[in-house]
Amino acid sequence: MRRSILAVLVIGSFLHSAIAGSPDPDEGDALDGFSTQHARTERDWEKKFRALPDGQKQRDYMQLLSARPHHVGSAYDKQNAEWILSKFKEWGLDAHIETFRVLFPTPKRRLLELLAPTHYIAKLQEPKLADDPTSGQQDEQLPTYNAYSRDGDVTAPLVYVNYGLVEDYERLQRLGVSVEGAIVIARYGNSWRGIKPKVAAEHGAVGCIIYSDPKDDGYFGGDVFPKGPMRPEQGVQRGSVLDFASSYPGDPLTPDRGDPNAPHMTASNAPSITKIPTLPISYGDAQPLLAALTGPLAPEEWRGALPIPYHVGPGAAKVHLVVESNWDLKDVNDVIVRIPGAVEADQWIVRGNHHDGWVNGAEDPISGQVTLLEEARAFGELLKQGWKPRRTIIYCAWDGEEPMLLGSTAWAETHGRELQEHAAVYINSDGNDRGYLTMEGSHSLEHFMNGVARDIEDPETKLNVLERDRLKNINRAKSDEERKEFRQRPDLRMEALGSGTDYTAFVDHLGIATLNLAFEGEDDGGIYHSIYDDFYWYTHFSDTNFAYGVALSQTIGTAVMRMADADILPFEFTDFADTMEKYNKDLQKLLQSKQDEAREREQELKEGAYRAAIDPRKPTVAPPPEDIPPHLNFAPLENALDILSKSAEHYKSAFNKAEASGFQSNDKQSMALNQKLLQSERRLTDPVGLPRRPWYKHMIYAPGVYSGYAPKTMPGIREAIEQRRWQEADTEIAHVAKVLEGEATLIESAAADLDAFSK
Ligand SMILES: [Zn+2]
């Protein structure tokens, strides 16, 4: 799994008075949270650090780590963990491996055949390519499958459901097509893959096939591999379909390792395992199936790039699907490094990227793992030269991310109590490409991250990466309003965190302020989770000279150092308060549009507009009437937001005043303040958790129950509105308001501490 490429398109704005002249970012600037003197030495150390990451070394590590398939439980996965451990030790770092035993199903039987009107047996096999030296390691490759699909043997008519989203089924209903008792075929994209079998099962389907349409990542986007980067005819996207968003990620058998009272599950009752058998296929295998469909023509936006008319079905097309797994327990091996802090050793800066892949996994995850390794090597160097980080730094090379965040979740849950007490931030990556810096994270870190990005040079344009992001956003803005914000808002907006990678347990379950970072957006590809995501592909079609690999090491390493070394933890809350205000407005708009839609539908039903518009020879069904959503009481939230922005402003002015006087605090004062700041993200959680998914404790960010990776902000409120639970929406508004009031109280108290500095 990895971050969403789309996130890069919606990054916000930034205007800095100094930007036009683009001053040497390394010289003379003050640093938030550092005394004047300390800022100077910090900048010196950071400059030394940024000269160290080496692209040739990253290339060598990648060649080695992706030389053979390294999925969970494979010999090479274990060997990689041990190799990573040996490198950390070679660089003088204190490292060890932590092992957890988890459920990891692997394919035993896979069969997909079209029984009528013609006969076709799906190949379910990605061929070896002559140009690509690692593509022929078939003995070690995991066959194409969706991990945590329930076992099953089903024969049923076939129905095409587009991306398989909730709204696609509403459309099917209007076309008069039901999937009750059918096997659905959905295309990859527009949602996390596990949503497809989940929603299909909720509509009565008995099996789910997911295929990669050439329109989404195949020849529609360019030449296919090995001539180009896109998905070839028999390329298949493997991947987990564990329903983590409505229950919990990690090992399905241990809902929360940190909780001694958590029930122990079995493979047959674990709530996160799919309800119906699911299998991924290539477009080569999908075409005969789709071509056999009759019934209504698919709506225009449902049609992909195969040279056939896309029908929805059902019809004579009948398929037989068999999925059976070995439900075995396997070890995951997390490699953990600890660099003890010199002053505030009990405050931790945690950084991670996974090392396991679906197959050879060069781009996902090794391109991120090699940036982490070069950060660690550089820190080893700096420590030898006398650098003493104020706080403790913990580096983590996770195992078992691909099946469903197994290694990171097990580690975060096991160390949950300590982490909640000690962790200031968690910084994640999960692969890297060429392009723009994508910044996602907790909004109390937005201002901090803007400062870091301003100090990193884009290797190709030589702009600082923050300025490049901002100018790109202006150029691609979709409205004048957007463009204006890109030009005028002091900080570039960060996107909220959804899920799909190892930060999930840290932010959603433990409430640790989190960042997720990568360069991306310039290279397209169609090798995701296939045997073709390998060294050959990466070094021909992505960051071929590892220049952006070096830039990511520089970006994340700088962030880690600055967080670890600051006298006062550089959290900032006016950006946070502004973002919460924005979410409040978004929610009210969402409710308004639901009301408008329901009213319009009611009127068109009354007028007979649907009936009149329908072609009598291709009958469709009018949508059912919907209750008009009631007004909701947003007052508690708005009152909380007022208090929040007031305390954020107070903190900011107290911070600036303290900074102007050079942070004349004693260590005792700063440490007491840091202890408060460290808890600021924790205040956004509630032990009760979100409705029907208590593992998710964060009240501001969560993955969507019906979107998967994509974030839902203020999720309790938002999903209640989307799912038309009006009473719950009102309750959740009050719930979020209470959490934000608690946050405001903490910020206010931290501001009072700062005021005392300058007295
Ligand atoms: Zn990944």
Image (tube, rainbow, N blue to C red):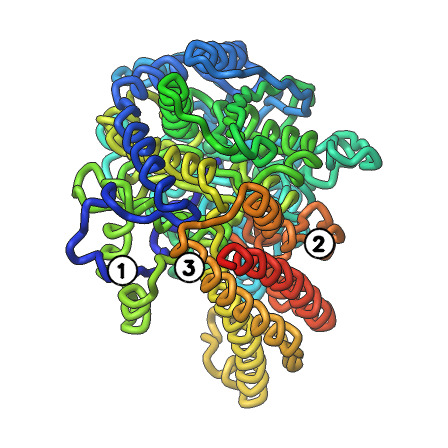
Q: What's the amino acid at mark 1?
A: His
The label shown at residue 686 is 2
Question: Dot 1, crowdedness within 10 Å: few (<14), some or many (≥20)?
Answer: some
- Give percent across and percent down for residue 726: 70, 72
Instruction: Please tell me whether mark 2 sits on a helix, a strand or a loop.
Output: loop
Q: Is residue 634 left or right of residue 611?
A: right
- Give percent across and percent down for residue 480: 27, 73
Say which residue appears at 71% left-offset and 36% top-offset.
417
Q: What's the amino acid at mark 2?
A: Asp
* Pick the front one: 133 or 686: 686
Q: Is disc 3 in contact with disc 1, using a CB cutoff of under 8 Å?
A: no
Residue at the farthest bottom position: 607
| Of labels 1 and 2, the one closer to you | 1
Residue 469 vertical placement versus 548 (above, below): below
Q: How many marks?
A: 3
Say which residue appears at 72% left-offset and 57% top-offset.
691
Give how far apart the Cα atoms at labels 2 and 3 are: 31 Å
Mark closest to the chain's N terminus, 1 or 2: 1
Question: Dot 3, crowdedness within 10 Å: few (<14), some or many (≥20)?
Answer: some
Is residue 86 at least partly visible in the picture? yes
Is residue 182 at least partly visible in the picture? no
Q: Is disc 1 in contact with disc 2, using a CB cutoff of under 8 Å?
A: no
Q: What's the amino acid at mark 3?
A: Asn
| Of labels 3 and 1, the one closer to you | 3
Residue 175 vertical placement versus 598 (above, below): above
- Residue labelled with disc 1: 16
The label shown at residue 656 is 3
Give how far apart the Cα atoms at labels 1 and 2 are: 36 Å
- Give percent across and percent down for residue 448: 41, 49
Residue 23 vertical placement versus 106 (above, below): below
